[in-house]
Image (tube, rainbow, N blue to C red):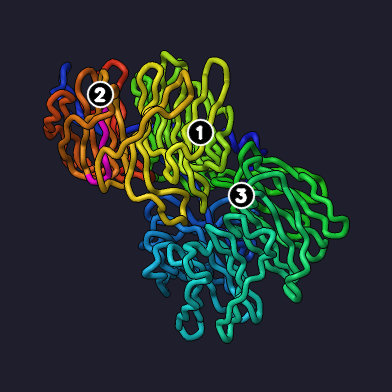
Amino acid sequence: MRRRTLTAVLALAALTFALPVGAAQADEPAPGTVTDLGPASEVTSVNGSELINGRIYTATGGVSPVVVGGYDLTTQKIEQRYELPTGGGAWATAAVGTDLYVGTYTPGDLYRIDTTGTAVTKVGSASPDSFIWALASAPDGKVYGGTYPGGRVFEYDPATGVKRDFGAAVPGEQYVRSIAVDETTIYAGVGSHAHLIAIDRATGAKREILPPEFADRTFVATLTLKDGILAAGLSATGTMLVIDTADPTKYEVVETGDSYVTAIAVDPARNDVYLGTRPSGTLRKYDRDTRQLSTLAVPYDGASFGRIFVDGDKLHGVVTNTVVTYDLNTGELTGVDLGQAGLPPAPELPMAITTDGPRVYVSGKAGVQVHDLAARTSVRRFLPGEAKAMTPIRGDIWMSVYTLAYLFRMAPDGDPQRVTTIGNEQTRPLDATYSAPDKTLVVGTEPEYGRYGGALSLYNVATGALDVYRDIIPDHSVRSVATLPGAVYLGSSITNGYGTTPRATEARLAGFDLATRTKTWEIVPVPGAKHIVDLVTVGHRLIGVTETGAVFTVDSRTHEVTATTTVAGGQIKMILVDDVIYGTNGKDLWRLDPESLQVTPFVTGLNAQWYGASALLTAAPDGSALYALRGRNLVRIEL
């Protein structure tokens, strides 16, 4: 048995993987030659978790198949392992005796695992919804779940196998992100406009119990119920409510100073409530006797607690890929990396890609995979978030990170360091680029859940000055960005924060003057298009593409559309190499002549698998190759 401190656990996050050696290539491989470089990004990342008989059962996210590991708190090893036949991951778990229930996403299936044996049984589905976001068990053994995008609540009775649908918790809301239940009542935490709904288990009658002064929050994202005490975490203000279920008008308000309360555990014996908050990554204690909030520990900057369990004089927390233990008597914090404990990394859905020449960087859940092309190895660098765009600048890699739209900087041989946050209710970066003449990193973002108005953000890497232009294209997100010296160009999306209904009907293209800091023009280049998914500049021309595959050229001087063509639609990514544009929707790769807009097939059958916005494509700085995905593997494509 080995016990590791958190410092040692974090050191294990920099895991090195040997990559398979491809077949020998000729000295000068033909253009279009594809070389497989192995898994693009590998991760151990867990979400839903339950403590059953001294073992924490936790389910993976972002990898297929979904794996549930039984981590023994005594041996500090994964002693049981189960695979689920469906699902891209699992956020939701609940325990009924020794049975573990797991709710998956894409598709939203419900499984029962017999933790005393090996049986894995699919017992239900959330269809037509694709996500089971939350699960909880009632004292009588019935299981309750919350879904997306229908925002529904359902019941599953293990005794009869019968499923009951309570319908949408709040009509028009898409998310039931948290759920708790007692003998008579289901409590459903709703977003992306916050509601806390009490549902009578017998009649199905619903009533709102969220105090009205908190109706402007985006989510009731976390719920925990024990002995009549209901604790609720509200986003994105990091507020916790401690509610008396006998009289919900009686409640305590706890302001954490963070943005999110990601996990809560109620300890009636001590009359305390324990909570994990982000982005600070803090484990906290709320003393209900003194009404004081105190800090217990910070495992690391940005730590995201998925669950907290009270186990006598210890707290156990599940934090991304680690189980941490906090001793309430001594204040000691220790942890074990689940990858080292027996839940090894697996290929995930990558999110972004870039290269500085010697290395290729691929981001995913809570990390960046750094591929050393000469050594044919890769190392995982921990990141408290998801890099949605990565940009090489002056020898470093700059990352635009979800959540809270953070900017991080990473040296090739170092770990990511947080630089600043965009703020302004922005959360999800959609695109980024660098204007070297202006020393400016340009980032386009989507707003927080339930909010309207994306932003253009300009960060001067020389001075550290950050300027944010919220809602620069009203009721649009900034989906794509490109630059010329002194100017930025924005392609919009009618999609705003998750859980909102578009107000606009068409994507727009705009110009922004860096000297005057003003938007100077705006047009609709493709009538009816909803998203301008990418932009590149070639001389004075702007070349963009929509989700439908409509390619257009706009003269940056006259702001007029001068040429159009079409390619296969999708979440297209384009990149300029010398005087040729290469583009892909993930399935195939094509070449585009910027002058004639003639499209030529280049590589077919990539069938890339990724998560997020645009397909992944980047080019070596010397123009010798492209890097993309084939399935979930990184490939080099010769030019």
Image location (x, y in percent) of residue 132: 46, 64
Which three-letter amino acid code belongs to the residue tagged 2? Answer: Arg
The answer to which of marks 3 and 1 sits earlier in the sequence is 3
Magenta stretch, main secondary structure class:
strand
Q: Which quarter of the picture shows residue 97? A: bottom right
Which residue is at 77% across, 65% downward?
A: 251
Which of the labelled discs sits on residue 541, or is there none?
A: 2
Count neighbours of disc 1 (C-alpha within 10 A) and say few if under 14, some if 14 to 19, many if 20 or more. some
Disc 1, disc 2: CB below 8 Å?
no
Of residues 131 and 114, the one nearer the viewer is 131
Q: Mark 2 falls on what kind of element? A: strand
Secondary structure found at label 3? loop
- Look at 34% across and 44% down and name the residue there: 610
Report the disc number at residue 59: none
Q: What element carries label 1?
A: strand
Q: Distance between the residues labelled 3 and 1?
A: 20 Å
Residue annotated with mark 3? 236
Residue type at the position of mark 3 = Ala
Is residue 63 covered in magenta? no
Q: Distance of mark 1 from mark 2, alpha carbons? A: 24 Å
Instruction: Decide whether residue 547 is among the magenta residues.
Output: yes
Report the magenta residues as a range.
Answer: 542-548
Q: Which amino acid does label 1 sit on?
A: Tyr
Q: Where is residue 365 in the image (x, y as percent from the top left)?
A: 47, 43
Question: Residue sitting at 50 percent across and 58 percent down?
Answer: 91
Q: Is residue 610 left or right of residue 207?
A: left
Q: In this image, 498 relative to 616: left or right?
A: right
Residue 601 visible here: yes
